[in-house]
Image (cartoon, rainbow, N blue to C red):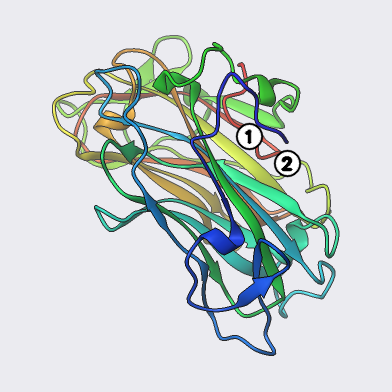
């Protein structure tokens, strides 16, 4: 996947240009670690960059996409007993000013399509606050040779850095959703139907609890390189009535394996994560290593802070963002 000129990269670093607590230089610009020589640790971290403020003067933060180009020496070794996948590294976006991880992605051995071949892993950055130092980290788990070639950052079109109204590099890669449910079609611990298909809760009528959960679906599409697991992105389409009063945590979104009783992906949403009030906003939660045939559950835990409506939950079996819906 290539960057487009309408959304220029704000950062582009080779493996050797970042800082390291383990590993060694591997080739002219890469950095690697292997189990024979290294202990678990950060293969890369830094560069503590402060990005320019968004061109839209009223924005105190912005989001984007992070691209890590990695290579592994063996993508077919069997996973640990009792598992269908093996996590070999954790990719992180860290707000070094606030000392808070704002974006993360688990890289599995099975997600590499080939051995000794560079492959790009990309995910949502989380909210980057103006003036904060940002670092991109690769936490290596001492399970396989892993090489980092480069890290890139591209802003979301909504920040005003881009001229296009839709991210052109994503359109061609947008698949049809595997499955989609309205808020009213899922199960509920609190709240009530709101409109023809939404489900909402508000502080005047409800206590904290699961606004939606379910649907215990088992038909998601297997991953390209490992037909025993599902990998992709869950999109939670939500509406809030006030996005400026404070920046408290208002909900936790998660993808839950109801068969194995494990949370496979989650994201905490704050009030100001919503770009607008009373307008649908989509939040992505990335999933890796979900065993095929297990019951799928998507949940919104509401924290009794503000009115929130769940409009729709959608799952795509590819890691794509901002697809036209």
Q: Is residue 232 left or right of residue 139?
A: right
Residue ID for mark 2: 220
Q: Is residue 251 left or right of residue 8?
A: left
Q: Which one is earlier in the sequence, the residue at label 2 or at label 1? A: 2
Rendered image: mark on residue 274: none
319 above or below 200? below
Q: Which residue shows up at 53% across the image and 51% down it?
A: 256
Q: Which residue shows up at 48% across the image and 27% down it?
A: 156
- Closer to the camera, 144 or 211? 144
Mark 2 in CB contact with mark 1 (< 8 angstroms): yes
Q: Judging from the image, what secondary structure is the residue with disc 1 in?
A: strand
Per the model, the C-alpha gap separating discs 2 and 1 is 8 Å
300 above or below 239? below
Quarter occupied by residue 79: bottom right
CA neighbours of label 1 inside 10 A, class few (<14), some (14 to 19), many (20+) = many
* Residue farthest toward the front in the current orientation of the protein: 28
Residue ID for mark 1: 315
Quadrant of the rendering where the N terminus is positioned: top right
CA neighbours of label 2 inside 10 A, class few (<14), some (14 to 19), many (20+) = many
114 above or below 207? below
Residue 217 seen in this snapshot? no
Q: Position of residue 211 (x, y in %)?
A: 37, 35
Residue 164 seen in this snapshot? yes
């Amino acid at each position: 996947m290539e960057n487009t000129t309408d959304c220029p990269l704000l950062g582009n670093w080779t493996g050797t240009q970042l800082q390291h607590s383990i590993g060694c230089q591997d080739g002219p610009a890469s950095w690697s670690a292997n189990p024979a020589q290294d202990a678990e640790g950060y293969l890369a971290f830094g560069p503590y960059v402060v990005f320019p403020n968004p061109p839209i003067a009223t924005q105190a933060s912005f989001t984007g996409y992070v691209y890590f180009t990695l290579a592994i020496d063996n993508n077919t070794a069997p996973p640990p007993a009792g598992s269908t996948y093996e996590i070999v590294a954790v990719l992180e976006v860290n707000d070094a000013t606030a000392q808070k991880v704002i974006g993360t992605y688990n890289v599995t051995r099975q997600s590499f399509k080939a051995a000794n071949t560079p492959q790009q892993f990309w995910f949502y950055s989380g909210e980057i606050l103006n003036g904060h130092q940002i670092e991109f980290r690769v936490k290596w788990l001492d399970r396989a040779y892993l090489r980092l070639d480069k890290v890139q950052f591209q802003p979301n079109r909504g920040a005003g850095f881009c001229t296009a109204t839709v991210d052109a590099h994503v359109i061609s890669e947008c698949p049809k959703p595997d499955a989609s449910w309205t808020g009213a079609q899922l199960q509920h611990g609190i709240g009530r139907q709101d409109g023809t298909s939404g489900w909402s809760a508000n502080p005047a009528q409800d206590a904290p609890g699961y606004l939606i959960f379910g649907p215990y679906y088992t038909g998601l599409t297997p991953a390209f390189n490992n037909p025993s697991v599902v990998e992709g992105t869950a999109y939670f389409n939500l509406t809030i009535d006030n996005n400026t009063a404070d920046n408290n945590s208002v909900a936790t979104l998660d993808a839950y394996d109801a068969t194995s009783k494990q949370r496979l992906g989650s994201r905490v949403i704050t009030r100001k994560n919503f770009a607008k009030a009373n307008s649908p906003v989509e939040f992505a939660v990335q999933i890796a290593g979900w065993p095929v045939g297990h019951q799928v559950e998507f949940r919104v835990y509401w924290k009794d802070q503000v009115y929130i409506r769940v409009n729709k939950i959608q799952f795509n079996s590819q890691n794509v963002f901002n697809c036209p819906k």
